[in-house]
Structures are given as structure tokens and as C-alpha cells.
Amino acid sequence: MPLEIIRNDITKVHADAIVNAANSSLLGGGGVDGAIHRAAGPELLEECRTLGGCETGQAKITKGYKLSAKYIIHTLGPVWYGGKSNEEKLLADCYKNTLVVAKEHNLESIAFPIISAGAFGYPKDKALKTAISVIGDFLLCNEMTVFLVVYDKATFELSEKLFSSITQYIDDKYIVEHPFNRRGIIEEIHQLRESYLEMPAFFSEEEPVPAKKLKRSLDDVVKNIDETFSQMLLRLIDEKGMTDAETYRKANIDRRLFSKIRNDINYKPSKTTTIAFAIALELNLDETKDLLHKAGFALSHSSKFDIIIEYFIEDGNYNIFEINEALFAFDQSLIGV
């Protein structure tokens, strides 16, 4: 689980280090800063007095003292002045420099708050976008578990444009199942047929699928019908010309879990893990359904989680960190974690 969004009090998170959204003096303040100083105890203040403060975008490390975390990495986020004072770069620097410090100290896990989104006035959706982007880029090249800690839902805000777009897509696609609903029965029949044949249905009484959406031939499906999930995954990785490391990092999957899958021909993954690999490999919707079928799963329009996944695949957005950001906003399970 390289990047996981969680709801918690950051002072209670079990990680090698937690990140303090500090003020320039590093001597404590309100919000997250004050909470961390109170939880760590007076020894933290004494060490901070020796550091000479902190510039915006920079990061400095101290011991964790009474916290469960061994270290605290302090960083000063930018105050929001309407976006015209280099705020985005300065906020990105907070995450980049903090992660550099964590890597220099060989840390395996770190927990961030959403920096500058409180009293500093940075728009929450923009602050979140920067956090996801910088952390995601780092994890594509480095091994570390990163928690993005949200204290409550009010501190987490998806961009209004994306939220509205996904909401509309869900409204258009979502089906509430009912025992006597003919459409629901047809959907169930189609899903059973797909699972049995291990290929998508080519008929629909109400919504025929245009031929242009069928991306692979019947021969391709039949040729690989006896593959296990593990065999299919490894074949797709080779076909895409990707390395193992590139694949599991893009899937937000821990290296040890990937090793289990590679070494066990009959490995049975969870649905979220299967979808994570489909996203990492940038599979189209038909290919994603094929991979899911190998693991014993299917996509359904009676599941908001499934519809959101379908939304991003059809939109051609395969950034797993942005997908998880949206899933979290809609109170759905995250993928790859």
C-alpha cells in the first residue's frame, strides 16, 4: 500500500515519521502544529529551538519523543494569496523536500496532513491535487509507504468539476437492483454469461455495444482461455513492455504482494488488487473485464465503485492516485492498497 488516504488523528498514526505543517519558527502553534507539539511533549520544543526556524517549502527533521512515530519532519507550507505568489511550487516543494529527508533517513513509512489547507487558506481541492501529484510521482520511483491523513471529511475536497462529472456519470449508469426489475434481471443474465464464456456479452436487448468498442478478437480470448489470473497478468506485463517494478508501483501495490502473485500460478487476488493492475497496465474496458473474470469478478452498474472505475477507464485517466482520490471522496474502497 504505497499511498493510502486515511481518516485519523495524525498524532496517532503508526509510521516511521509524521509530517508537521509547522510555522516559520518551528516553536508550535495552532491546528496540526499545536496538536503534534502537545502529543510529543516539551522535549520537542527544546529541539526545535536549535533548528533556527524553517523557510517556506523546506523541511527539517526532529525526534518523535512521546509520539509513536520515531521522527517528525517539519515543513512550512505557503499562505494562499490567490495563486499569484508561487504558491503551487512552494507547496509542491513541501512534499518533495519532506520525502527527500525521509529517504535520506531510510524511512519506510511517513504520514502527511494536507499541508496549508487550514489556517493558511490554500483551497482544499488544489492542496489535495498537489499532494497526490507529488507523492504519486515520488512513489513511481521509490519504495515507501505514504499515508495522506484526513482528520475529517470537511478537510477533504475533490475539485467541483471532477466531482460533478463523476456524479453525473453515476446518475446515468447506476442501476438499483429489484427482484422484479426486468432490466436488473437482464443485467444479471449478461454477467453470468460473461463469467461463463470469459468474454463480454455481444448482445443487449436495450443497449447494444457498438462494434468499435470491442478491442480484441474472439481468437485472442479463446487462445488464452486456460490461463490463470497470474499467468494472464504476467503475459500482459510482457506485452506492454513493462518491468515488474514499474507495474506494481503504478498499481500502488506493495512489492511483497506482487512477488506472491508472480510466484503462485494459482494466486487469487482481491477485486481491488485486480483493478489496480488493470489501471497500471492501462487496459481498456473490455480487457479490464477479461482480467477481472480471470480472478472471478465482474463490473456491475449496481456498484458505485465499479461505475467510478469505469468512468476513469473510459476517460483514459489511468493515474491510480487520482482514482483513489475520487474513490475516497465518494466513500468507496481504494484500489491497490
Image (tube, rainbow, N blue to C red):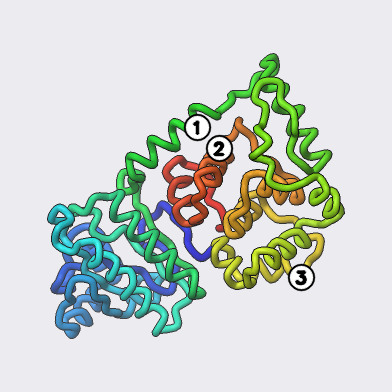
| First along the sequence among labels 1 and 2 | 1
Mark 1 and 3 residues: CB-CB less than 8 Å, in contact? Answer: no
State the separation of the CA atoms marked 2 and 3: 32 Å
The residue at the point 32 percent across, 68 percent down is 95
The answer to whether one can see residue 316 in this image is yes
State the separation of the CA atoms marked 1 and 2: 6 Å
Residue 263: image tag: 3
Q: Position of residue 162 (x, y in %)?
A: 38, 42
Three-letter code for the amino acid on which mark 3 is drawn:
Asn
Q: Furthest-front residue in view?
A: 212
Q: Residues within 10 Å of mark 3 (few under 14, many from 20)?
A: few
- Identify which residue, 204 or 320, lies in the foreground: 204
Closer to the eye: label 2 or 3: 2
The residue at the point 14 percent across, 73 percent down is 25
Mark 1 and 2 residues: CB-CB less than 8 Å, in contact? Answer: yes
The N terminus: image quadrant: bottom right
Q: Position of residue 302 (x, y in %)?
A: 60, 30
Residue 170: image tag: 1
Quadrant in the picture for residue 259: bottom right
Residue that numbered label 2 is attached to: 307
Three-letter code for the amino acid on which mark 1 is drawn:
Ile
